[in-house]
Amino acid sequence: MITLLKRLLTLALLSQCFMVAPVALSAPIETTNEALKEARTLHARAAREGASWTVAIEHLKKAETLMRSGDYENSYEHANHAIYFFELGLKQNQFPLYKHQ
């Protein structure tokens, strides 16, 4: 009787794990997708304005590769790095270049 209860409890716990996992995983996927979308938008804007940095493009490529492989945490991190460098390039592009005279 006790082994039957242990088995039922184990099955109940396992079923709860499988029910929660897809719900818990959807939030990182959504936030990563949003970060990648923002990074792509900034990349297009930076390319139009001539303010695109190679390091930002590399972070964006790495984020897309990690997203395809299912590593959402690192993909999100690289997407945020890309966003940071694209924004930095756009801010820096607003100021006139220093000209030595």
Image (tube, rainbow, N blue to C red):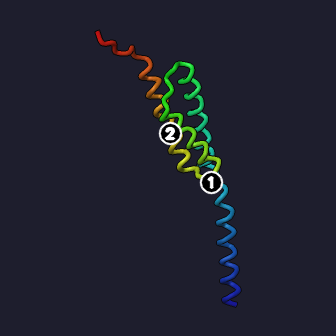
As helix, strand or loop, the secondary structure at mark 1 comes to helix
Amino acid residing under circle 1: Leu
Of tags 1 and 2, which is closer to the observer? Answer: 2
Residue 66's place in the image compared with 8, above or below, is above
- Contact check, label 1 and label 2, Cβ < 8 Å: no
92 sits to left or right of 18 = left
Number of residues whose C-alpha sits closer than 10 Å to that of mark 2, classed few (under 14), some (14–19) or many (20 or more): many
Q: Which mark is residue 80?
A: 2
Quadrant in which residue 60 is drawn: top right
Q: Which mark is residue 69?
A: none
Give the residue furthest to the front: 101
Q: Position of residue 36 (x, y in %)?
A: 59, 38
Q: Position of residue 100 (x, y in %)?
A: 30, 12
Q: CA distance from mark 1 to mark 2?
A: 19 Å
Between 8 and 29, which is closer to the camera in this rendering? 29
Q: Position of residue 89 (x, y in %)?
A: 45, 26
87 sits to left or right of 18 = left
Mark 1 or mark 2, earlier in chain = 1
Instruction: Please give the name of the residue rendered at 66% of the width and 83% of the height, measured from the top-left corner.
Output: 6
Give the residue furthest to the bottom: 1
Between 58 and 33, which is closer to the camera in this rendering? 58
Q: Position of residue 44 (x, y in %)?
A: 59, 26
Q: Which residue is mark 1?
A: 25
Instruction: Please give the name of the residue rendered at 68% of the width and 62% of the height, measured from the top-left corner.
Output: 19
Residue 101's place in the image compared with 34, above or below, is above
Total tally of numbered discs in the picture: 2
Amino acid residing under circle 2: Asn
Between 28 and 100, which is closer to the camera in this rendering? 100
The quadrant the C terminus occupies is top left
As helix, strand or loop, the secondary structure at mark 2 comes to helix
The quadrant the N terminus occupies is bottom right
